[in-house]
Amino acid sequence: MTEKQEHNVSSRKASKTSSKVHEMDLEESELNDPFQALMEKAGNHGRYQTLYNYVFVAGLAFSGALTYMNIILALNIPDHWCTVPGMEQTNFTLSEWRNLTLPKQTDNRGKETFSTCEMYDMNFTEITDWSTWNVSQRTTQTTVCQNGWSYDQTWYDNTIPTDHNWVCAKDLFVTNVFVVGRVTEVVGSFIFGQMGDSYGRRLVFFISLVFCSVGRMVSIVCTSSYTWFLIMSGIVGLTVNSLFQSPQIIGMEISREEDRSRIAFFQSVGWSVGTTFMPLMFWWLRQWKSFMWLTSVPTALALIFSKYVIESPRWLISKRRFRDAIVQMKKIAKINGRNFDVTEKELAEIYRQEKQDVTYGIASLFGGWRLARNTIIMGFSWCVVAVSYFTLVLFSSRMAGNPFLNFLYQSIVEIPAYVVGRYLGDTYGRRFTNSVSFIISFIACLPIIAYATDEHYENMMIYLATFIKFLNALTFFTVNLQCLEIYPTCMRQTGIALGTILANAIGVLAPYLVYLGTTVDIRAPYYILGTLFLLGGIGATFLPETLHKKLPDTMEEANHFGRHDKFFSLPKPPLASVEAEKMKMPFQPELTKLNQAEFAP
């Protein structure tokens, strides 16, 4: 044997040993993925995936963010005060006139300002000689606004509340809209999340698209009827989460393993670009109606591309609908310039050992110890992300200055967070990225707690709060990706829906944290957030690593997922292509039968 032959034999032995070691660390179901072999035949990284990801993942995230978030700016209530007639008969400035006609009140920051809902109870138009009139002649009695309200138009020409005077006695009208939206989001996530796993992602996607776009556009024309406005706002909330979830799940289920984080990145960036672009549009238009129309119509335009929306073939196979799965894969293959000639009989032969899982909705996520543990930890992670996100957003809404720039800053900081999150998640793993981000957020809360009461450190507090918002976006990206990769195909949308339900339900606590910070102790929210960040960081370390592993398809695979993971380890890169082929051996006999005459129908 020559020296070169000895070297080749030695290399093969070493490679074989390495392969065995790697196989020992991973569950067989985490490696064998016959569906990827099928998708490679149709094209799992081709023109169709590119079109789908740009239009239905990134593009719809952009337009959907506009439709979902535009109501926040349109319902903004600018500074307002009682309209008191008579100023036109004087030479007083607006500030001088308000000082004469409006009583003072203390705002939530302890600052004395003009009353927004009361005026002095006297008729100032009856004063004919202002040169002899003085403040001592003014009554001390006050009354509610008798002549409507005047609004500060520094930033807006009008908003929905200014057009319909949703202030003072009606000041809960705006709050009720947000509460109804939050409640319907929880209900919709419960209903449509399970519908996606039972009746298909495509059906839920179209229902969500129609409900969101029509609901928002109809709400624009019915603001004069508060009841109908609430109903339409509730319809938007009912399907808004499934509008984003369905196309993202389909995109991941028809793509390569290494493209999964890229798809999540596309959607996250699409969302952030939309929420960054939106305040600039309102700043330019200044009127809520034109702003709402311009930000609501694009979502409906996605229906133009409806023929490119497929049902997930992976989901169809999990339901043993092999004929329908082949139809969908042929659509993908046609656009990708491939020839997909696998028959229904061949497909059934490949999956002959797998049986359709019987599931019981959300309860199935707790059907085994390992899956139940993962579900509980993922749910807690969603809660921490939601509470911190809503708390930071509410704090930013109380900032002085340009409301559009304040909103923009909160959005634009998310984009670099997604870039960093994708790099860390693809390099060091989802588990490491999630845990470390939570821990750093906890550390960032410590100086805020120590120095928040000292006004000299106010700028440092703003920078640290912005940094925590950056980490919050990074954690959201990672948690969302983990959620998509941990749950099995038959329960994937239900698992994501459960996270959304918990996030929206626990997000109700955010206003109370802000209340504690503004009325009791400015450090109070960060005591609570810091504790949650620490617990979230510890809990995330007990999740299985999902990088370089195939998506679980069955409940059994999900219950065994990560069983052999070592606690103190980082994910290993995929093996060389030759060794990877060996990993497919349990399915190799079935896969090699494809397109052989004796197995034709």
Image (tube, rainbow, N blue to C red):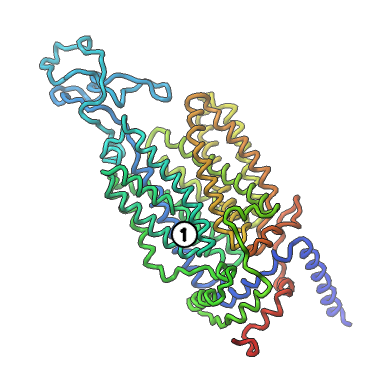
Q: Quadrant of residue 593?
A: bottom right
Dot 1 corresponds to which residue? 58
Q: Is residue 202 visible?
A: yes
**Which residue is at the far left?**
128
Instruction: Say which residue appears at 31% left-offset and 23% top-offset.
Output: 115
Instruction: Say which residue appears at 14% left-offset and 26% top-offset.
Output: 88
The location of residue 184, given as percent across then percent down, is 44, 47
Q: Secondary structure at mark 1?
A: helix
Q: Is residue 110 above or below residue 184?
A: above
Task: Specify the amino acid type for callout 1.
Answer: Ala
* 220 on left or right of 585: left
The location of residue 227, given as percent across then percent down, is 32, 43
| Crowding near the residue tagged with mark 1, few <14, some 14–19, many ≥20 C-alpha atoms within 10 Å | many
Viewer-proximal residue among 532 and 467: 532
* 424 on left or right of 275: right
Instruction: Say which residue appears at 53% left-offset and 37% top-offset.
Output: 465
Q: Is residue 336 visible?
A: no
